[in-house]
Image: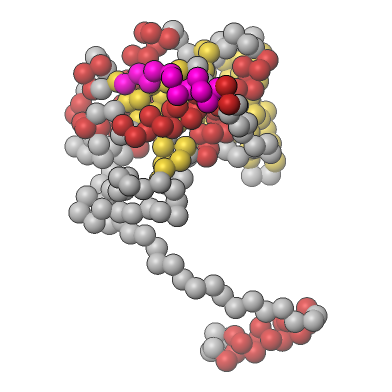
Amino acid sequence: MNILVCVKQVPDTTEIKIDPVTNTLIRKGVPSIVNPFDGYALEAAARIKDKNPDTKIVIVCMGPDQAKAAITECIAIAADTGYLVCDRAFGGSDTLATSYIISEAIKTIEETEGKFDLIFCGKQAIDGDTAQVGPEIAEHLDLPQVTYGLEAEVDGDVVKVKKEVEDGVEVIAAKMPALVTFTKPAWDPRFPTIKRKMAARRAKINVLAAADLTTIDLARAGLGGSPTKVKKTFVPVKKSGGQVIKEESNEESAKTLFAALSDAGII
């Protein structure tokens, strides 16, 4: 079994800063973490590996050189090896360009690691919240996809996914190779052991530049290859907390709320 997990290093959401000229995130000097939804995808892969010990888990991450830390963290948790897709030509890519670059990187990685039976992604990155990159990778690679996965198990050449839907859970089967995106399940991801942490520090992170992706069309990458154009971005102004009304009874609380709203001219 060969599983690829796509991860992204994202800024700590309490520390987001925007470059007013380029309208892109300022990452230098900003605390970064592994995107939480990608952590759920990694845990889903690790649970498959628990049942199938011969499973290999490979990480791919697109980002600047500092994103190696995210790959190292994933190796410490459960992965076997990792690849960083990094090149100035990729800077400023929107979701369509990003998914195209990653799909080209996957083709290159498969030349070394072998064909992937499964590709796991988080449902979305917390710095963009688009939920587009995973499904777009599936389209670029012409793979069946299941989104909003909670759990996944392998049965022969089929992956069975518990999928979150509005009124409950569905179980969907897809023939492998397939791509699955994951949302937050009922369980928390595992923590790395001391032994794996030490091994992860010594692990080699493979770096793929544009020149390594032999079939890529750079006209479809970076700002120039991104059909989405950001007109303006900003960090929302933090507002003070509201007034808490807590009287001795619900009836008294309702009266106090009504009076406050009346005095404010809201009702």
Left-right relation of 225 to 80: left
Quick check: can you spot residue 144?
Answer: no
Query: In this rendering, is residue 165 above or below 1?
Result: below
Q: How many marks?
A: 0
> What's the residue at 65%, 89% (across, down)?
259
Query: In this rendering, is residue 27 above or below 39?
Result: below
> What's the residue at 50%, 19% (across, down)?
199
The x and y percentages for residue 18 are: 30, 54
Residue situated furthest right in the rendering: 249
Q: Quadrant of residue 64?
A: top left
Q: Is-magenta flag for residue 201?
A: yes
Q: Nearer the viewer, residue 27 or 123?
A: 27
The x and y percentages for residue 33 are: 45, 41
Left-right relation of 209 to 175: left
Give, as a single range, the part of the protein colored magenta.
Answer: 196-207
Q: Nearer the viewer, residue 144 or 51?
A: 51
Query: In this rendering, is residue 110 above or below 103?
Result: above
- Quadrant (top left/top right/bottom left/bottom right) for the N terminus: top right
Q: How is the image coloured?
A: secondary structure
> What's the residue at 33%, 54% (across, down)?
17
Q: Quadrant of residue 158?
A: top right
The x and y percentages for residue 258 are: 66, 86
Quick check: can you spot residue 176?
Answer: yes
> What's the residue at 39%, 63% (across, down)?
236
Left-right relation of 158 to 133: right
Q: Is-magenta flag for residue 102?
A: no
The x and y percentages for residue 202 are: 43, 19
Q: Nearer the viewer, residue 20 or 100?
A: 20
